[in-house]
Image: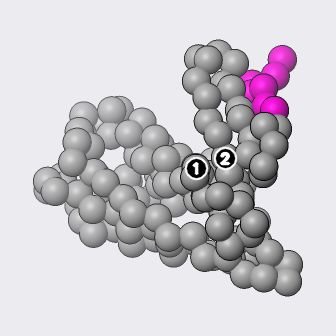
Amino acid sequence: MATIKSSYSGNLRTEMTHIQSGRNVITDAPLDNNGKGEAFSPTDLVAAALGSCMVTIMGIVGNRDGEKLEGLSWEITKIMQSNPRKISEIIITFHWENPSKDKNTLQKLKNAALTCPVALSLDPAIKQTITFNF
């Protein structure tokens, strides 16, 4: 059974619906590729998926080990290349206001992030530069 139902809206815009939840996401082509840039581009979603996946897996480990991740935030920079146009690097910088004091827990969380399903699914040619400021 399908997970997502999608349609083309015209003007380089797509709309996707997550079937189980009914939530929608739209994409636009970026300004530098003939689009309006009024929403995430498809490649923005790839970069965002990497960060969200990392934090989701960290959250699973944190829940299991009794570690709260409140205050954790991150910034993502996506770098594109041309000829062919594709993502060359995703840079993610994590910040945590009140990290765990336990170094073993912190290392478990970092390892979990680096081995999330999206990180493992991306082409190895896409450089993943991850910084943990905690």
- Residue 39 has which mark? 1
Question: Which stretch appears magenta?
Answer: 1-7
- Residue 14 has which mark? none
Query: In the shown orientation, is residue 100 left or right of residue 4?
Result: left
Q: Is residue 119 visible?
A: no
Q: Nearer the viewer, residue 47 or 124?
A: 47
Residue tagged 2? 27
- Mark 2 secondary-structure assignment: strand
Query: In the shown orientation, is residue 34 left or right of residue 30?
Result: right
Q: Residues within 10 Å of mark 1 (few under 14, many from 20)?
A: some
Residue plotted at (42% across, 36% down): 60
- Mark 1 secondary-structure assignment: loop
Placement of the C terminus among the 4 image quadrants: bottom left
Asked whether disc 2 touches disc 1, contact meaning CB atoms under 8 Å apart, the reply is: yes
Query: In the shown orientation, is residue 60 left or right of residue 49?
Result: left
The percent coordinates of residue 86 (x first, y second) are: 76, 72
Amino acid on which disc 2 is placed: Thr
| First in residue order: circle 2 vs circle 1 | 2
Is 9 inside the magenta-drawn segment?
no
The percent coordinates of residue 49 (x first, y second) are: 58, 49
The percent coordinates of residue 23 (x first, y second) are: 58, 24
The percent coordinates of residue 75 (x first, y second) are: 39, 63
Q: Nearer the viewer, residue 94 or 14?
A: 14
Residue plotted at (58% across, 50% down): 39
Mark 2 to mark 1: distance in Å? Answer: 5 Å
Q: Nearer the viewer, residue 114 or 48?
A: 48
